[in-house]
Amino acid sequence: MVKKILFGLLKKFKFLPQKTFIKIYYEYYSGKKLDLDNPVEFYEKISWYKVFFRPKILNQLVDKYAVKSYVEDKIGKQYLNETLAVYERSSEVDFDKLPDQFVIKGVHGYHFNLIVKDKKKLNKIKSRYLLKKWMSKNQYFRGGKEWAYKDVKPRLIAEKYLEEMGKEVLNDYKFFCFNGVPKFVQIDLDRGTTNSRCYYDMEWKKLDLYTKNTPFYEGEIDRPENFGEMKKVAQKLAAKLPFTRVDLYSIQGKTLFGEMTFYPSDARNSFLPEKYNKIIGDYFVLPAIPKGQKYITSLVTD
């Protein structure tokens, strides 16, 4: 009850300056003090990233539609899922023109996903209400003031429904990349059902690493036959970025792009065992803020 009351108060603090709010937000979720002048642990540095790292390209890279042109330019359109339609308003969505299976996403945030496996069973009234609600949201104010989302225009995209024979839900391979180098991959299994997770290094050795909010998957996962290609794709997309997580799928040996994110879990999570917060934090070398400036507004291009 006390935590619920505190969360209600936290939402009322959105009027505070970003830096002040993020300190309160981080400390509320982690139980740890946040020193933005000397961040050490991974999620401390993600909080710093929210405030001080502001190259304009980030607005494109978190936009689930706009990022596709970046991906096509870097690695080719063969890695992209098929876009069926793009909508400026929720009222434009015509379910009758979409195939029997499809996915609709809000490009301007996360957890905006309508997955339709059988259109005949779709509740169109409820779905339209949901899409309209998404379009009214700004992810920056909805969560922990993640800068990259602040100016992303709300839109909806319909995409081809992805599936793999013998699997109810696709595995999601999330590559944690530091200065363009993938260090380890988070694998999310059975999302939307049992929701379990585990981590492997780049030699496909399972790590004793887990997060406090998601059950650890105890079993072993077969190395994807295209894992080498997936690493190269992640590396190319992450080039020149101090940190990004590149999410990919492997379907019958084919690599497909999912999304890019800069603020995993909105900096509300924590690695376990505790030592990994510092180990992974050491991978994340924060760039220097140029003298006389408040923020970093461009990428290093040398």
Image (tube, rainbow, N blue to C red):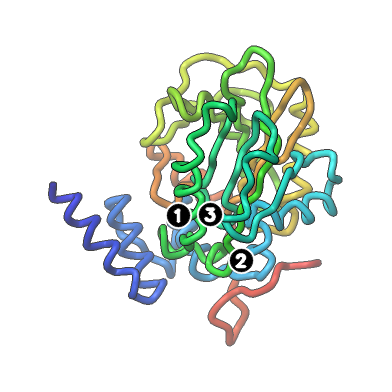
Q: Residues within 10 Å of mark 3 (few under 14, many from 20)?
A: many
The residue where tag 1 is placed is 133
The residue where tag 3 is placed is 109
Question: Given the image, on which type of amino acid does mark 1 rest?
Answer: Lys
- Res 115 label: none
Q: Is residue 70 above or below residue 59?
A: above
Residue at (81, 67) in percent of width and height = 302
- Between the C-alphas of marks 2 and 3, the distance is 25 Å
Query: x and y percent of residue 173 in the render?
Result: 62, 33
- Between the C-alphas of marks 1 and 3, the distance is 12 Å
Q: Quadrant of residue 224?
A: top right
The residue where tag 2 is placed is 287
Q: Quadrant of residue 248?
A: top right
Query: x and y percent of residue 253 in the render?
Result: 78, 23
Q: Which of marks 2 and 3 is in front?
A: 3
Q: Nearer the viewer, mark 1 or mark 3?
A: 1
Q: Which of 50 and 106 is in front in this view?
A: 106
Q: Which of 80 and 55 is in front in this view?
A: 80
Q: Which of marks 1 and 3 is nearer the N terminus?
A: 3
Q: Which of 267 and 92 is in front in this view?
A: 92
Q: In which quarter of the image is residue 204?
A: top right
